[in-house]
Structure formats: structure tokens, C-alpha cells
Amino acid sequence: MAASEQKLHLAERMSRLGTESAFEVLVRARELEAQGKNVIHLEIGEPDFDTAPNIVGAAKQALEKGWTHYGPSAGLPELRKAIAEGVGKLRGITVDPAEVVVTPGGKPIMFFSIMALLEPGDEALYPNPGFPIYESMIDFVGAKAVPYPLVEESDFDIDVDEILNKINERTRLVILNSPQNPTGGVISRAKMAALAEALRSKDVMILADEIYSRLIYDGEHVSITSFPGLKDKIILLDGFSKTYAMTGWRLGYGVMREDLAKHIARLMTNSNSCTASFTQIAGIEALRGDQSPVDKMCAEFERRRQVIVNGLNRIPGFRCRQPQGAFYVFPNIRGTGRSSKELAEGLLNEAGVACLSGTAFGGWGEGFLRFSFANSVENIQQALERVENWIKKG
């Protein structure tokens, strides 16, 4: 019997599993390119820089030295120590290597934390517009995803009272993301301090997604981990993909209380066994080696940020605030009279510019688009010209 003749009986929970639209749009853009259409890619959240040669060299040496075998589920002790030192130095806190779990990318920390902490009927707060996997994974485990809004008028900073008013006896987790995807917003020190003070007495855990922590252009990165009295409540998510242009290496980590780290490591054992050993050796070099490539990349992103913000603000119907971190802009496009999805699809299919509808990041993303400026200034300028010409043609 052919496989297609057998009815597939999926578990009900699969109907609650979402996706990440950036990869879907990338597939569609590649299909158009295969048909001969020229497409400028401003959809995918990936640095367009190559991984620094010293990191690549460390991986090559690791392969040659036999780092091709299983390692501990929580990560190599050498990398966990380097992460503990790096996290502690950047955020002004003390971290024990036993509090670190290394994973193949940052998403497993989201997945495992939500699986470990939430029961059906529990509630978890997450930012909207926000990274879609938060809501997807909360729904998947049968918990209730409760959004809190990030609004343009406050530069997409959090509203502390809005978050606190949504916390009740069923709330088990509050997710924070700063710098933020998709808006490029950053939580200010004053608001982070106010939230930290309020959450100190709440019986909730905090998942702090700080994957863009080194990509800051204005002000400072403020981590909730730096405020006293919260250590046992926080799961810090970070990784190598964005900071070190290592997206394809799949290397991330979480920092959390030691008793929770043991459970997260057990989930690693049951799913991935371990993270690839030679990539972990490369991660040690990334953390302890030359940091100038990170600084150069950040400076170039800052230059591109100005180009794309200025260009978008010249397009009729667009209004774009300047992001403080990450490498995304989130322009308001309500002035065009079109929906976010309609505009994103039109720009891809007709103008040859791949971007994402704001609704890919939640309902409060309607009226916005997300453009990644992880592309060359030349390509960004060409994309802006295409967008403007297409909009003016109506």
C-alpha cells in the first residue's frame, strides 16, 4: 500500500503548533528566484556576515583533534565555564557553570523551559508583536498564551502595569525579549527596574530572551538578571547565532537555577542527546577570542539602520521609528490603506522584495511590516527604490 493511501492520525496537539513565517517566505522567495525573478531578501533574521576566521579555525582544529563524539547533555564543561564567565561579565552577575545548559540553538531553551514549567490550564505572558515561537510552544503544551502589547507610541517598550494586570493565580511564566524581534525595541532601565521590583514578590518564572544583547545601537542593554532578588526566577536565553554570525552552527544556551538546569539537561538527553562537540569548541573561541568582528558587524548594522529608516520614511504611507537594537525595522504602513499581509505579498510577488507581514508576529502586528537590514547597503537601497516605485504605482 502506498504511504499516501494510509490515513494519517496526528495527535491533537499538532493542530496547536505554529510556525515561523520567515522561513516560509524564504521558501517562496527561493521559488520565485528559481523562476528567474530577482528577489532582495529582507525577510530572514540572519546576519549576512561570515563567521569570523578564528572561530572557523577553532572548529576545524576540533574536528582534526577528534571532537566528533558524544558529549554531556548539558554541554562541554569548558564551554559552560566560558559561558558562565561571559554572561557574568556582560551582566555584572555571578554565574556557576552548573547553571548553564548548552543547546543546539536558542529555541530549545524556549521549548524545554515551557515544557518543564507549564501544565495545561496554566498561563504564560508573552510580547505581541513578538517572536511567534513563544505563542506556538505555549499553545502546544496546552497552556494559555496571554499576550501583552508592545506599541509604537512608546518605541515598543513594555508597559509594566499592562503586564502586572495580566498576572493572576494561574500565571506561571512571563516572557521578556530585549532587544526585541520584530520591532527592534529595547526595554528601558526604568521600566525593567519597575518590573523587576514587582515580579520579585510574584510566584512566577521569567524567560528572558536576550539573543540580541550585543546588538545595541542606542543606550544600553539592560538585563533583568542584573536586578537583585530574582535569580531563582529567571531563565536567561542567549546564543551565538546573532552575535557571532553563527546561525547555521546551531549553538545556544540557557542560564538558570541549578535544579532546573538538571531537568532541562534531561530534556536534552531525551531529544538531542547533546550539542555537537566541535561546534562547542568553536563557541569557546567565539567567547574568549577576538571580539572586534562583533564590534565591526554592529557598526555596519548601525550604518544600515540609518539608511533603511530614512528610506522608509520617504515612502508614501510609511512611518518608521528608529530601532535601538537587533537588526529589524518595523514600519507602520497603515497610511498605504493596505493590510500587512496584502502589502507583504505584493512586495514579494510584484516588487521582488521579501519582507514579513506584521501579523506574522501576532495580531497587534497588523498595520506593520518587518524588514531585516541584515543585507548590504546597496541591496537595501535597491529594495527601498523598488518598494517606493511599487507603492506609487498603486
Image (cartoon, rainbow, N blue to C red):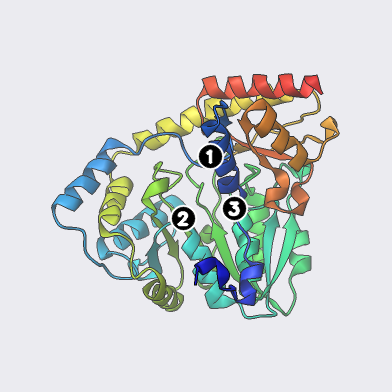
348 shown above or below 140? above
Residue 376 position within the rendered picture, expressed as x and y whole percent measured from the top left: 50, 25
Is 378 above or below relative to 60?
above
Residue 77 versus residue 19: which sits nearer the camera? 19
Q: Residue furthest left?
A: 65
Badge count: 3
- Left or right, residue 139 beside residue 41: right
Q: Position of residue 363 (x, y in %)?
A: 77, 53
Q: Residue at x 70, y 43 (%)?
A: 357
In which quadrant of the rendered view does residue 174 lie?
bottom right
Q: Which residue is mark 1?
A: 216
Mark 3 or 1, which is nearer the eye? Answer: 3
Point out the tag, 3 or 1, that comes first from the N-terminus: 3
Which mark is first along the chain, 3 or 2?
Answer: 3
Residue drawn at x 39%, y 45% as measured from the top left = 246
Q: Amino acid at mark 2?
A: Asp
Q: Quadrant of residue 57?
A: top left
Front in this rendered view, residue 221 or 172? 172
Query: Can you say which quadrant of the picture contains the C terminus?
Result: top right
Label 3: which secondary element = loop
Mark pair 2, 1: CA separation = 15 Å
Please state the horizontal and vertical placement of residue 136, each as a whole percent of the image.
Answer: 63, 63
At mark 1, the secondary structure is loop
The one nearer the camera, 89 or 79, is 79
What residue sits right under mark 2 in the picture?
Answer: 238
Q: Residue at x 73, y 48 (%)?
A: 359
Reading the image, the residue beneath label 3 is 20
Marks 3/1: CA–CA distance: 24 Å
